[in-house]
Image (spheres, rainbow, N blue to C red):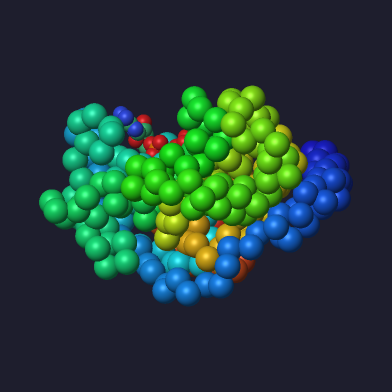
Amino acid sequence: MEKDSSKFTNAFNRFEEWRNNVSKTASDKIGEELNLGSDTKKDATIDIEKLNIYIQNNHILKDISLQLHDKKITCIIGPSGCGKTTLLKSINRMIDTTEHVRVEGRVFVDGEDIYDKKAEITHIRKKIGLLSQRPTPLPMSIYDNITFGCRIHGMRNKKTLDKVVEKYLHATGLWDEVKDRLHTPASALSIGQQQRLCLARGLAVEPQFILADESTSALDPISSKNIEDLFMKLRERYGIIMVTHTLRQALRIADYVVFMYMGEMIEQGTADELFNHPKHELTKQYLSGVFS
Ligand SMILES: Nc1ncnc2c1ncn2[C@@H]1O[C@H](COP(=O)(O)OP(=O)(O)OP(=O)(O)O)[C@@H](O)[C@H]1O
């Protein structure tokens, strides 16, 4: 049995090495092309205070208090059904789209209580973009996908919109791949390209935070690595909060980790604290594969 598992680990490590080599060119290019300009953006935080969420009277999130950091990647991990996606959706009020939901507690984004009666949802979602599990291009051209949010927020000038399209296609390493077909349907792009386009669309409205819900799980290994590399670059400017099922992915990219179990936040800390010195027995069991 031990022999089998070491065979598996060796095969996995060889696969990772291959993937790193194959994706190196693409990832170098993203590094070169990602020019987001000088960073004058002030650091923001997300403060979650005693958040409880009930769906159809089931207590889904239990008394979560947590601070999420700007310019860092925080990975939310935990077994299936523990509430990771619900937590993510509660941070930009996507949870409001769930039927029979009740929210108690408060979520402050850059000091603003997003559950305050006066809070404006469009404004909140502009501050906190969401990248879903599967790419969700709008049924329109590449160009219109990127400018969609900007137009909603009142940007009309054609030259400014052209600049936005070029900037964020560069930022996501897509410019060279699509610059000659900006006005063709986004649906014709590969799945990996579509996911980068969705990220470019989210970035174009200048959010403070990016939420990513297993955003690489539907992608092939190379496209998945490209998105990971992008996140590593983007954290110079944005706070990224990412739900992942893959512990190896969290190990590769997380600055902070939050471990959840059955609706509760069991443990949180820096990646080093949580992976190398977990305090809670449940965290230790989860990391060692006792349950998944
Ligand atoms: N719209 C809904 N109606 C009823 N129950 C829901 C709804 N959305 C989520 N739940 C329940 O809330 C709990 C948490 O779900 P959630 O999707 O947040 O978990 P998760 O940790 O992201 O799971 P997974 O890793 O499998 O995606 C689950 O028991 C789920 O069945």
Residue 215 position by quadrant: top right
- Left or right: 167, with 52 as reference point: right
Against 70, is 143 above or below? Answer: above
> What residue is drawn where x is 43% and y is 49%?
157
> Is residue 278 at least partly visible in the picture?
no
The quadrant holding residue 51 is: bottom left
30 shown above or below 72: above
In the displayed structure, would residue 14 be above or below residue 207?
Answer: above
Q: Residue at x 42, y 60 (%)?
A: 208
**Residue drawn at (61%, 42%) of the image:** 196
- Residue 60, given in percent of the width and then of the height, sits at 30, 41
Question: Which corner quadrant of the figure contains ligand 1?
Answer: top left
Q: Position of residue 189 (x, y in %)?
A: 65, 29
Residue drawn where x is 70% and y is 36% of the image: 180
Q: Is 213 rendered above or below residue 232?
A: above
Depth check, front residue: 29 or 175: 175
Q: Relative to the observer, which residue lies in front, 200 or 58? A: 200
Residue 214 horizontal side relative to residue 233, left or right: left
In the rendering, at what x and y percent does residue 74 appear?
Answer: 50, 59
Q: Position of residue 123 (x, y in %)?
A: 29, 52
Image quadrant containing the C terminus: top right
Is 245 on the left-hand or right-hand side of 224?
A: left
Residue 99 vs residue 188, the one in the foreground: 188
| Tally of numbered discs | 0
Q: Which image quadrant: the N terminus? A: top right
Whether residue 220 is visible, yes or no, is yes
